[in-house]
Image (cartoon, rainbow, N blue to C red):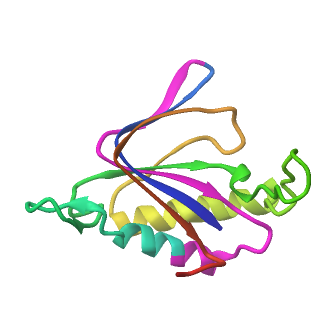
Amino acid sequence: MRAVIQRVSTASVTINSEMVSAIGNGLLVLLGIETEDNPEDVEWLCGKIARLRIFSDDNGLMNKDIAEANGDILVVSQFTLHAAYKKGNRPSFIKSARPEQAIPLYEYFLSTLTGLMGKTVAAGVFGADMKVALVNDGPVTILMDTRNRE
């Protein structure tokens, strides 16, 4: 499971010219689910995201987590995070989980993160053609991969 986590001032998801989700200050999480992922990966990643201290304290240091910053989270599924590009120029997405496996893990991710946050996590629509808009704050962008738990 891979996540690109961006600290944002605002972020939104639009589908067919209709805004379906939007947040202000918080995190935009682009989430890629691969065939080897399981509920343990979800729990580890959600815990890391909820405790990630990348918001400024009164001294301007990154010491606050999302709850302490009173921020929100927007999660967008993105199978392209598992693109294999070693051979040729056309990426392969063979490692990306098929919808029958990915959707339950995506929904579990949303419910787990909602539980850790104590409030609803905003989301895109799985499999939809989405337009994602954001203002990256900092910029702060962090990549996490459950196969490489640094």
Nearest the camera: 150 or 118?
150
Q: Residue at x 42, y 61 (%)?
A: 114
Q: In front here: 64 or 39?
A: 64
Give the residues in magenta. Answer: 17-44
- The one nearer the camera, 120 or 124, is 124
Q: What is the x, y in percent for residue 113? A: 45, 64
Q: Is residue 84 left or right of residue 64?
A: right
- Does residue 20 sit above or below 59 in this rendering? above
Image spot of residue 83 (x, y percent):
77, 55
Query: Among all residues in the image, which is located at the extreme left?
Result: 58
Q: Residue at x 70, y 62 (%)?
A: 33
Screen quadrant of the N terminus: bottom right
Whole-percent x, y for residue 66 in the image: 30, 61
Q: 141 left or right of 89?
A: left
Is residue 42 rendered magenta in the image? Answer: yes
Residue located 22% across and 66% down the image: 64
How many discs appear?
Answer: 0
Please check the rendered image and state whether residue 125 is part of the magenta-colored stretch, yes or no. Answer: no
The x, y position of residue 99, in whole percent, is 79, 54
Q: Is residue 10 left or right of residue 146?
A: left
Image quarter for residue 130? top right
- The front one of 115 and 4 is 4
| Residue 91 vertical position relative to residue 111 in the rendered view, above or below | above
